[in-house]
Amino acid sequence: MPYADLREFLKTLEREGELARIKEPVSPILEISEVTDRVSKTPGGGKALLFEKVEGYSVPVLTNMLGSEKRIKLALGYENLEDIGWKLYRLLRPEIPNTFLEKLKRLPELKKLNDSLPRIVRKGPVKENIIREKINVLDFPIPKCWPEDGGRYITFGQVITKDPESGVRNVGLYRVQVLSERELALHWQIHKDGNHHYWKAKRLGKKLEVAIAIGGDPVLSYVASAPLPPEVDEYLFAGLIREEGVELVKGETVELEYPAHAEIVIEGYVDPQEELVDEGPFGDHTGFYTPVDKYPKMHITAILHRDNPIYLSTLVGRPPQEDKYIGWATERIFLPLIKFNLPEVVDYHLPAEGCFHNFCFVSIKKRYPGHAFKVAYALLGLGLMSLEKVIVVFDEWVNVHSMEEVLWAWGNNMDPSRDVLILKGPIDVLDHSTSQVGFGGKMVIDATTKWKEEGYTREWPKVIEMSKEAKEKIDKLWDRIKYQIYGDNRGA
């Protein structure tokens, strides 16, 4: 069963021993971040942290909510996250039934899809308190994450807009800088749907309404980060994961809908006719500060919140952080879609240490000369995979999640003069290494076994492996040998 709200999820985390309640008074200025940073860098990601005594506030702050494999599986409700990917695949690639019997067989699946649709309800807990006058977003303990940040930042808000032409909703995870009591700066990067909506509104001469929802079922926080195609509503995707539609309420000052069980919602608008404002610096997930740049300003028209709200935040910075596990979930969920488009792909990995967009390791079933380059080109044409900077392609037997195996195969199978291509294309705007923002070089590396048809004129050597007979014999003797070596069970 899906979680009704953030509070129900916290009960599960507490029951599972995954929540730590911090009772020491700490400041939202840097101190919450310092505690969170230390915990998120422990093996396995540490626990979720509920800061119950935030200096100057009565509202607690929750961080590191999804910062472990166990917690993100608990949040999404799946042990195998690829199962979610196959649900998304069926949504994007529906098979057309050829016979009446096939149509009947699809009825249960269509009912599940219908049950997953977002539902508009008349009221919800988020409307227990509605503030239209004396608006001050700093009444909430919004952290300042790093010393040189340009201010306090909302980092885990579901930023909701609608396409000014089609009316299709987008829910994105964008950092939001607090400029004043009633003004925010929205970091809508050039490759993201929020930016697309902004420029459409500017062209049409319309104001763009915005709602920022904080909290609710943890699935909602995850789907805001998911790189979905523009035509897929994130809240529909959340419903597919939950197998139950997300309850939404209509806004008070905006023609938008948002989660009825959110903890806090900020309503407002962006006027594209206004000049862009300075946003940043911000200590981002690359581990470096991104510099000041120009972004749209949001005017707050209302703030809604539950009684005794919980403020949800996430910390990004030098990896690993909580986003390591959010990125891992995305990697697993979207593998089925990649396999559909590229059946030769066995697996892929976007290591958090590479900030997800710096390295992509992919293993393939190689069938013809140049196959590795074909796969790399195709990946660079798939959504936000287009921002990958280095793609390394391996044979199917290489475990792309093992850095030891990756470096071993990469170093041994790659000749730089033959197996490296340098390309140009779009780059993540947070990447500071390029001479131009959002555009720069890419590298494709073929680390597969080379064939004669690819110009390899020598005899490719065999990988060293022990004989089956020797392995089987030692398997039978191993318990006794192990004891003679270690004297206990350490060799198990």
Image (cartoon, rainbow, N blue to C red):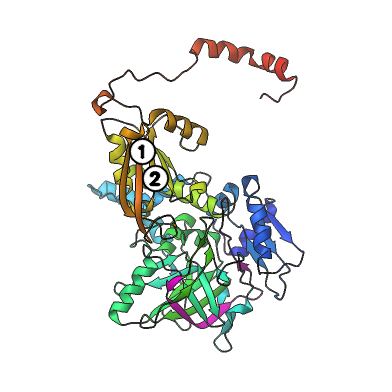
- The picture places residue 469, in percent across and down from the top left corner, at 51, 10
- The picture places residue 17, in percent across and down from the top left corner, at 70, 51
Query: If the image is split into quadrants, where does the C terminus sit?
Result: top right
- The picture places residue 279, in percent across and down from the top left corner, at 48, 72
Which quadrant of the structure image shows residue 28?
Answer: bottom right
In this figure, what is the number of numbered marks?
Answer: 2
Magenta-drawn stretch contains 297: yes
Magenta-drawn stretch contains 109: no
The structure residue drawn at horizontal position 41% and vertical position 48%, both measured from the top left corner, is 334
Relative side of 238 to 473, left or right: left
Q: Amino acid at mark 1?
A: Ile
Q: Residue furthest right?
A: 24
The residue identified by callout 2 is 390
Residue extent of the magenta highlight: 293-320
Is label 2 in contact with label 1 (beta carbons under 8 Å)?
yes
Which quadrant of the structure image shows residue 272?
Answer: bottom left
- The picture places residue 409, in percent across and down from the top left corner, at 44, 30
Relative side of 268 to 317, left or right: left
Q: Is residue 181 above or below residue 3?
A: below
Q: Which of marks 1 and 2 precedes in the sequence?
A: 2
How far separated are the C-alphas under marks 2 and 1? Answer: 8 Å
Front in this rendered view, residue 423 or 203? 423
SS under mark 1: strand
The residue identified by callout 1 is 445
Q: Is residue 102 above or below residue 33?
A: above
Query: If the image is split into quadrants, where does the N terminus sit?
Result: bottom right
The structure residue drawn at horizontal position 46% and vertical position 59%, both measured from the top left corner, is 225
Front in this rendered view, residue 186 or 268? 186
Q: Amino acid at mark 2?
A: Val
